[in-house]
Image (cartoon, helix red, strand yellow):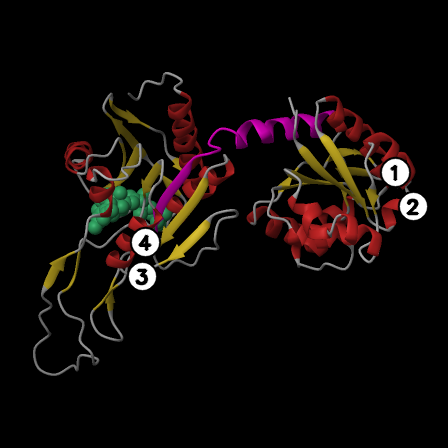
Amino acid sequence: MLKGKKILLIISGGIAAYKSLELIRLIRQEGATVRCILTKAATQFVTPLSIAALTREKVYCDLFSLTDESEMGHIQLSRDADLLVVCPATANILARMAHGICDDLATTALLATDKPVMTVPAMNVKMWQSPSTSANTKLLRARGVILLGPIDGDMACGEFGPGRMVEPEFILSAICEHFKETALLSGKRALVTSGPTFEAIDPVRYLGNRSSGKQGHAIASEISRLGAETILVTGPTALEAPYGVSVVHVETACEMYQACKAALPADIAVCAAAVADWRPEKINAKKIKKSGDPPAISMIENPDILGFLGNTKLDRPSLVIGFAAETGEVLDKAQKKINKKNCDWLLANDVSLGTNVFGGETNTIHFISKAGAEPWPKMTKKEVAKRLVLRISNHFREVPTNNG
Ligand code: PMT
């Protein structure tokens, strides 16, 4: 199941560290290699010698060991792995990870890595429930770090509650599941647009819309999680860059169009951005003065990015997906859009006043393809992203679906 995979296991200093020995055995049984870094505190609970015997690899303990650095520097150690697993993860190491502190080899490797990171927290109930740990784990999750557990149980300290580490068998299946998922879109390249565009009227004013980027960013994040190289071209939003995604920031529709063209070739294109259809024909060099009648603004049409991606003869992504934001006769209008823009799938959403789709957390989609329209229930935007991206991966695996 894990044949050829390389795991970098970081063992921090908690009583549950002894369970990492069993985890090493299980991972190796599945065909993966395991290299280990022990924090100073971890060496109080397990010995480098027993870890070396189990992994049949050199064990790394000290950031400033010149021998370690000449054999395999901390950067290479973290880059050479397919996955970093921190097990057990103490409150201390989670805090240091959340705040970018790198004062030993373990945290330096974690900061330097460009690979997915899984953590397996284990600590006293009160430490797990403390506001600091909650804030740290929230930050880490938002940055794409995977957290497994903890679960409720008896603690070594005699207390009962959440804080107990999940068992090694559970960690192994999560690792296997991770590799299964990240293989789904591996080798694919995806382009996603998100957010609004701003079209300047003068140095102060612009025409914009209420898109928050939540839907587009969630899609980019999910596509990247399933292993595709993902480029997100986004208009101005207040959102953080999704983990593992290359982000291109733009302001206007014309800039978004150029950035999308530059991102080709791609296998997948998802246009979730709310692109302005028109822009002021001319941007006033100076702030328009309030005098006399309100100014008339003459508008010209913006490039249609989705239309370009769907219709281009050169480098057309093999799966082009658009959205349709409608305020009535949703299905009829969406059907016309899918034909005009020549996209393969279209996600139509009703954005009438009161739906709160623009800017809100949820969305209600009609999924339209050549096979017809399929209503999806109201979901969070993250759930919409998961459902769509699973469908994308099915499409590429040629698993028959009912969407054509
Ligand atoms: O950002 P959120 O707050 O999370 O809100 C999500 C959303 C409502 C913005 C999203 O779900 C959505 O509907 N995005 C498309 C908005 C839109 O511009 O729809 P449209 O029907 O006007 O355009 C149809 C399609 O053409 C869209 O895929 C759009 O990205 C694309 N388009 C439109 C105009 C243009 N010049 N270029 C384009 O690529």
Mark-to-mark CA distance, 4 and 2:
53 Å
Quarter of the figure that contains the N terminus: top right
Ligand 1 lies under 8 Å from the Cβ of mark 4: no
Residue 29 percent across, percent down from the top left: 75, 22
Residue wearing tag 2: 44
Residue wearing tag 3: 251
Mark-to-mark CA distance, 2 and 3:
54 Å
Residue wearing tag 1: 156
Q: Residue at x 36, y 30 (%)?
A: 377
Task: Count the marks.
Answer: 4
Residue wearing tag 4: 259
Amino acid tagged 4: Ala
Sequence-first disc among 2 and 1: 2
Range drawn in magenta: 169-194
Q: Residue at x 56, y 49 (%)?
A: 143
Residue 349, by quadrant, is top left
